[in-house]
Image (cartoon, rainbow, N blue to C red):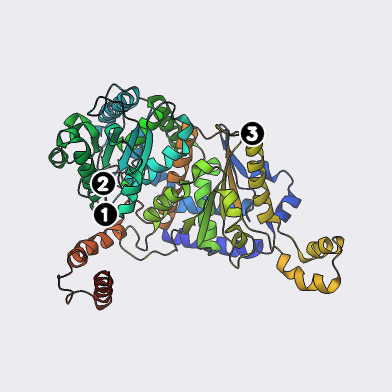
């Protein structure tokens, strides 16, 4: 396998030298129907990858690379419930959480669907009871606000999705998300709320996560102070598997919803971790959200690699990361409600594939996860797009845009789409020095000024981008978008031979924080055993505090 991969990589590198002399725009000159040949479709979703420095030979080599790496076998192992998370000895089966087919899904020989359906029914019924007012707070008033307390996968996914799907809230409660241990986060969130009409969801599988439990304790203290200790049971729910700790906190057993070890945190939005989202958008919309992801699962399993959208997304990423040596990748949604989508993808991609050790424990043979970054498009155009157009290193871009708006002015949306399409074309085409000179001459500028200003207005172009376009951003579509990126990340992990489902790098900082916390909290705690740099900063902090 290694020899085959090495040979295909060498062929790709050689072909890159040939393609490097061709601009993307010139590929359209040779094939005006290139859009049709270099786009893939899934119902109303189109993945346009025509504006990349790719030709048929490069694509065939990339597909061969996927086969050399054993992608199809790895995909079967993923969906077959094998323990592909080797370092933790676990299957990876978040896809079972959104399985809407009714067919069995086996993990370690047992069908998990009955348990999945039971938990889904429990938390969706609870969500509907909150929305309808059948379950109220301690004063008998229905809840107007839901505050999810979590961090990482217990926050990023639900927070992103709740914002993206805000038009589908109807008469449901407002949703808020607290994750930062910085006290400003919970203080600012709670300040405008009527605590007698607020429900808190503590999302922590172990019920020991430091940031989450610190915020949960603060919220509990505020509720107890405002409404009395007896009100705790009426104003808190939990997503956790540690029933003893949850009970000790004061949460009623029928308000605790669990999930399984085969669900990783950054893949948990499909589980009861999505409770706040389910309360926000209601049962039907949440089920549509699941259904969209399930349909992408089927596409990923069934579509030939050449027409498989997550496979193509992954291979294009490998093409630029490993063959062109580009170290960053931007995701730019032209949708204000997808304002947290790229932040969500940062965890999904970089926590999954930010590894330098292969599955067998050896150093990786190829560079892995690029830096994922981005913001909604129109604001980005007036900020970092300068670098995208004229920076010294090209950054491949994913553009996301809906054909139709949801609860937005159609004229505004038409301008939004026009901006998206213009940016992708401008990145590809650029503007040559000759074109600049002609434009400046036509404006009446004299030659000395043209010579002075001209170089600054040249755009190299040839900057690659993909576009994902879909009818509208509804729950079904958001489910599809997330699942597309999930499977893209998995495909890349197979090619790079890394475990996408552990996150040991996250643990190191947690361990050090536990060690350092006493010295930071207690000014009389000794620091002589700490690293000199850390001890120096703690000492400086103490001096700043004492100067107040």
Q: Which quadrant holds residue 499? A: bottom left
Residue 87 circle label: 1
- Judge the density around disc 3: few (<14), some (14-19), many (≥20) Cα neighbours within 10 Å: few
Q: Tell me the SS state at disc 2.
A: loop
**What's the residue at 53%, 65% (across, down)?**
325
**What's the residue at 42%, 43% (across, down)?**
160
Q: Which quadrant holds residue 95? A: top left
Q: Tell me the SS state at disc 3.
A: helix
Residues 256 and 4: in front is: 256
Q: Which residue is mark 2?
A: 90
Residues 27 and 205: in front is: 205
**What's the residue at 54%, 53% (across, down)?**
316
Please state which of the two labelled residues, at mark 1 or mark 3, is closer to the viewer.
Answer: 3
Q: Tell me the SS state at disc 1.
A: loop
- Asked if disc 1 and disc 3 are in contact, CB closer than 8 Å, the reply is no
Residue 411 in the image, given as x and y percentages of width and height: 66, 36
């Amino acid at each position: 396998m290694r020899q085959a991969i090495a040979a295909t990589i060498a062929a790709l590198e050689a072909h890159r030298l040939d393609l490097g002399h061709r601009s993307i725009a010139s590929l359209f000159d040779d094939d005006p129907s290139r859009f049709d040949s270099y786009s893939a479709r899934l119902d109303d979703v189109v993945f346009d990858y025509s504006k990349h420095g790719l030709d048929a030979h490069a694509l065939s080599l990339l597909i061969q690379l996927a086969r050399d790496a054993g992608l199809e076998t790895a995909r079967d192992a993923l969906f077959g419930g094998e323990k592909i998370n080797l370092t933790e000895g676990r299957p990876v089966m978040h896809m079972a959480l959104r399985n809407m087919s009714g067919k069995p899904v086996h993990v370690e020989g047992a069908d998990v669907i009955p348990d999945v359906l039971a938990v889904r029914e429990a938390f969706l019924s609870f969500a509907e009871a909150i929305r309808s007012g059948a379950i109220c707070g301690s004063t008998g008033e229905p809840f107007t606000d839901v505050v999810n307390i979590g961090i990482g996968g217990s926050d990023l996914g639900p927070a992103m999705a709740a914002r993206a799907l805000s038009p589908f809230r109807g008469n449901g409660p407002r949703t808020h998300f607290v994750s930062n241990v910085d006290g400003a986060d919970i203080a600012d969130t709670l300040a405008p709320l009527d605590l007698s009409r607020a429900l808190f969801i503590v999302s922590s599988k172990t019920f020991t996560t430091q940031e989450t439990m610190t915020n949960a304790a603060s919220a509990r203290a505020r509720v107890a102070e405002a409404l009395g200790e007896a009100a705790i049971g009426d104003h808190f729910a939990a997503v956790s598997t540690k029933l003893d700790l949850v009970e000790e906190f004061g949460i009623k057993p029928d308000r605790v919803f669990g999930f399984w070890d085969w669900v990783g945190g950054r893949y948990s939005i499909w589980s009861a971790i999505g409770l706040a989202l389910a309360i926000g958008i209601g049962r039907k919309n949440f089920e549509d959200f699941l259904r969209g992801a399930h349909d992408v699962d089927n596409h990923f399993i069934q579509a030939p690699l050449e027409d498989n959208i997550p496979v193509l997304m992954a291979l294009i990423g490998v093409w630029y990361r490993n063959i062109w040596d580009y170290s960053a990748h931007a995701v730019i949604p032209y949708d204000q409600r997808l304002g947290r989508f790229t932040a969500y993808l940062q965890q999904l991609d970089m926590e999954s594939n930010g590894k330098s050790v292969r599955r067998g424990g050896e150093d990786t043979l190829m560079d892995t996860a690029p830096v994922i970054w981005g913001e909604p498009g129109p604001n980005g155009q007036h900020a970092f797009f300068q670098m995208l157009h004229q920076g010294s290193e090209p950054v491949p871009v994913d553009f996301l845009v809906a054909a139709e708006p949801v609860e937005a002015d159609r004229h505004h949306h038409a301008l939004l789409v026009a901006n998206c399409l213009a940016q992708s074309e401008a990145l590809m085409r650029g503007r040559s020095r000759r074109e600049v000179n002609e434009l400046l001459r036509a404006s009446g500028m004299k030659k000395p000024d043209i010579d002075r200003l001209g170089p600054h207005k040249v755009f190299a172009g040839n900057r690659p981008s993909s576009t994902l376009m879909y009818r509208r951003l509804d729950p079904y579509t958001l489910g599809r978008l997330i699942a597309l990126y999930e499977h893209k990340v998995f495909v890349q992990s197979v090619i790079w031979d890394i475990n996408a489902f552990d996150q040991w790098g996250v643990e190191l900082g947690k361990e050090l924080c536990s060690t350092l916390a006493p010295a930071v909290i207690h000014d009389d705690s000794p620091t002589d055993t700490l690293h000199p740099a850390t001890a120096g900063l703690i000492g400086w902090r103490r001096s700043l505090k004492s100067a107040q």
